[in-house]
Amino acid sequence: MRIIVLVKQVPDTTEVKLDPKTGNLIREGIESIINPDDRHALEAAISLKEKTGGKIIALSMGPPQAVDALSEAIGMGVDEGILLTDRAFAGADTWATSFTLGKAVEKIGGFDLILCGRQAIDGDTAQIGPQVADYLKIPQVTYVFEIEAVRKKSILVKRRMEDGYERIQCELPALLTVIGELNTPRYAMVGGLIDACREKAPIKLWNAADIGVQTCDVGLEGSLTHVIRTFAPKSQRQGEMIEGDAEAAAKSLIGKLKENSLI
Amino acid sequence: MIRSNPEELIRKSIAKFVDNELIPSAQEIDEKGEFPMEMFQKIGKMGVFGIRYPKNKGGAGGNTTLYCIICEELARGLMSVAAITAMQCLMGTNFLFHFGTKEMHEKYFLPAMRGEKISCFCLTEPEAGSDLGNVSTLAKKTDKGFVVNGMKTWVTNGPVADFYTVLCQTDPAKKLRGLNFFFFPKDTPGLSASKAFDLLGTRTTQISELAFNEVHIPHEYMLGQEGQGLNNLLSILSEIRTMTAALAIGLQRAALDDSIRYAHERAQFGRTISKYQLIQAKIANMAVNLEASKLLTYKATRMIDNKEECLKEASIAKYFATESACKAGDEVTRIFGAYGYSMEYSAQRYYRDNRFLLYGGGTHEILQPNIARWVGL
Amino acid sequence: MTVWIEVDLCNGCQRCIKTCPYGAVELRDGKAHILDRCTSCGACLEVCKQKAIFSDMEPKVIPDFSDRKGVWVFAEQRAGKLTSVSLELLGKAQELAASLGQDVSALLLGSKVSGLAKSLINHGADRVYLAEHRALKDFRTLAYTKVIEELVARYRPNILLMGATHVGRDLAPRVSRRIGVGLTADCTELSIDPEEGILLQTRPAFGGNVMATIANRYSRPQMATVRPGVMEPRPTPGKKGRVIRHKVSLKEREIGVKVLEVVKEKKKGVNLSEAKVIVAGGRGVGNAEGFRKLEKLAAAIGGEVAGTRVAVEEGWIPPERQVGQTGQSVRPELYIACGISGAIQHRAGMMNSRYVIAINKDPRAPIFQVADWSIVGDLHDVVPEMIKELKKG
């Protein structure tokens, strides 16, 4: 089975701190990581390969440093990494990104399954999976939390819904987006990480010309949506600091709740 | 060609393991006081134990710098787990790797690399610590092999190890030139480990005595050429000292991180204690010592990787980083105030665990005169 | 495609630095300097009063979309029941349609669902496009996409909104790619730009404390998804509307998937979205034991217990009590955040609470930025004191 995993490198936004004086994001020490949902997609691909054999290719788009995400994927057990990197790709919305990734998948060719995380923690759009699937004209199942069986021409999965789940049979080739419930990702093998850093490592870098796209169709230029304004969210909160030790603070807080008829 | 930096990559990967797996269970492991088997196996699964050995012989193809980065990160989580890992990568397996037979390689070395067998290294005796010429565990040569009698103590992993690398004397008249390393599987008749000692720090470390009573072993269990034991030991001494320094860096980082976090949280007289200059001075000193420890230690690891002689640099790094770790363990408990005295917080653990570093790789009372000699006294 | 600064013209006013959405401009020796991070988005060009910033970008031509009319809402139904977010979107759609002078339509797809049309009209739909077919009984991406593609091609709407539910987040991106339009996910605010007449889509972005307004100038319909619980329904009882049937032809083999089984899992008696008071805990609670304290507080004050993703992952509380981006969005009267740092993913789920109390040991925790009342302190000390105080009456 040939599996392509879409992987994104993201800033680790789960531990964000704000400067108490300016309210600005403290950027120092925020590391880049493999997007958490994508890590589950990698694990799913690797455990499928362990059962059925085959080959796994991790595909990512990003600046040159995003090669780290692919190196780590190789450390986990992926066979090959491809990084789409080009200044022209920068600033892409999901329309342009799904086009770029779709083109790269076409160039790779011959796959049975594409796996990706449900969404990336820096954008939370959850759009790339379905959009790539549509570009490639293959069926999709999103929110997958269990892969029950893989057959020759189809795959049996469970899809998480708000109030339960659905069991779905999907024809192959297909694209699945997965959620954390699916598995526990393994840690990379240190030997694999070392190999991934070598000159001969199976990592390729492709630019716009390599995948045969014009710069006007990718990145910011190829995007259909644009950020026209950014602003700090206006907090309409009173933001009152209640001082004193635990007892005093609790007392004055409950007082405030009573004043506002909240209790 | 754009490629990742293996040092950053491995540090990040191990750091994630430490943050997600080791730190959350550190307190529990320490309190239980048992060999942390689950953690040991998880570390084995990441292929860490082979970090120093070449890929084509069952290792991960790394080097001493990468080895020390891993030791440092693990020590940031829990010293005892880091120490067991450090031993499994180096002292516990090194001579087996270099001098063991093919069969020993298959049956013991490779499983040890995967975390399926526990290794162990025995030097110290009741009457011989730094004074190795006094080692009296005697391996007497016979037609069939060797008969070993004697006693080792302060044997890390003694009660749990699957095989031992043991320094023995084959000819007392030759003193240091009569020292040789031997390999012993756990179940060899006549070999017995005592109960684990009760320890001040690194409480999960299983340290015991190991008694040899008419233990018969074949010739091939002698690791290395006869009479080369001391030289073999010296061949990894710089690395042992540098690794100990790396463990000390990990402990300093843990103590510093906790100190900073606590200083931001704890408020007295209407402001957090981070605003007080005496607290700032403590934290600044910890940071300075940490930075200096890193420079000394990673200078030594790079010399080892370049195959340069660096016993002096390694000894200086071990001495300074360990002393700094002891200071950091002291300061963190002061910054925590009375909470530093509570077993509920990890500050106390840094205070206890730092003592472990003082003895491994040579006491400072041995290192200091050596350093003095090297600089011209 | 590049953006550059004529250093001689720059007076170091830093307007461009504040405006740059990517943090890609910094001050060097008193002059603005563009970093590698720059994506050439051009936001800085507009704000530079010195006209010191230049670009070789050619402005993209905006096509004429004057024939595009109508605000559409995808009315999501499951097993013949409308989801609440569909009605909430109809509420917002009425407002948007009014500013545009256009009308509101709902898309109703399914099998034997015509009975729901009335409810949609009574919540603001002027028209309901009804597509009924056996193959549409369960939601299946390709079937639904094909029908919506046909409807859009035929009736040419201006705006298309969907709920950011598990169905909406599966369907909306697929539809957007299929019909060649941009899509903005998880908007918290939608409005019409009074001059340009385009849909302004606002959502949290860039990892945290930034809101981004996004425009979709180059394609129609302008598509956006909105999380459940963010907008409010505006019932229009007695309203008259038209139901327009759309003839569907679908073959099983073009759908690609079969739904073998739909399994409902009972929620354990929690509906956080309707709770008046929520006591929520995060990493700072420390363990499942710690949550007992929060439960006691919730009991004393008459509320529900909830938690962050971390609290769920640690197994301290069940997943159905998770608030945040990957959990539920809630809007209680009072939200008490205990030991929650307030990462954007969590804030996204509780921002619409009427009052927020934050209790955290770390004064740098972002949760304090969105709190009405803040206590810097250990929740394990403060919460029991609160319970004591409440019990006094």
Image (spheres, rainbow, N blue to C red):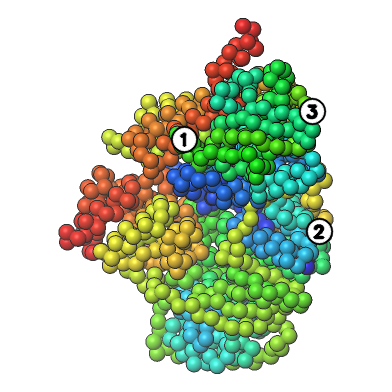
Vertical arrangement, residue B107 with respect to residue A137, above or below: above
1 or 2: mark nearer the eye:
1
Which quadrant would residue B81 be assigned to in this image? top right
Mark 3: secondary structure: loop
The residue depicted at 49 percent of the width and 31 percent of the height is B354
The residue depicted at 44 percent of the width and 83 percent of the height is C123
Q: Count the labels in the image.
A: 3
Q: Name the residue under label 2.
A: A211
Q: What residue type is labelled 1?
A: Leu
Tell me which chain the residue with mark 1 is part of: B
Q: Which of C22 and A85 is in front in this view?
A: A85
Q: What residue type is labelled 3?
A: Gln
* Quarter of the image where the C terminus of chain B is located: top right
Decide: few, some or many residues near mark 2? Use Cα within 10 Å; few <14, some 14-19, many ≥20: some
1 or 3: mark nearer the eye:
3
Mark 1: secondary structure: loop
Q: What residue type is labelled 2?
A: Ile
The x and y percentages for residue A76 are 69, 53
The x and y percentages for residue C305 are 36, 64
Q: Mark 3 points at which residue?
A: B225
Q: Name the residue under label 1.
A: B199
Residue A14 in the figure: left or right of residue C152:
left
Q: Do labels 2 and 3 share a chain?
A: no
The residue depicted at 54 percent of the width and 47 percent of the height is B36
Vertical arrangement, residue B356 with respect to residue B171, above or below: below
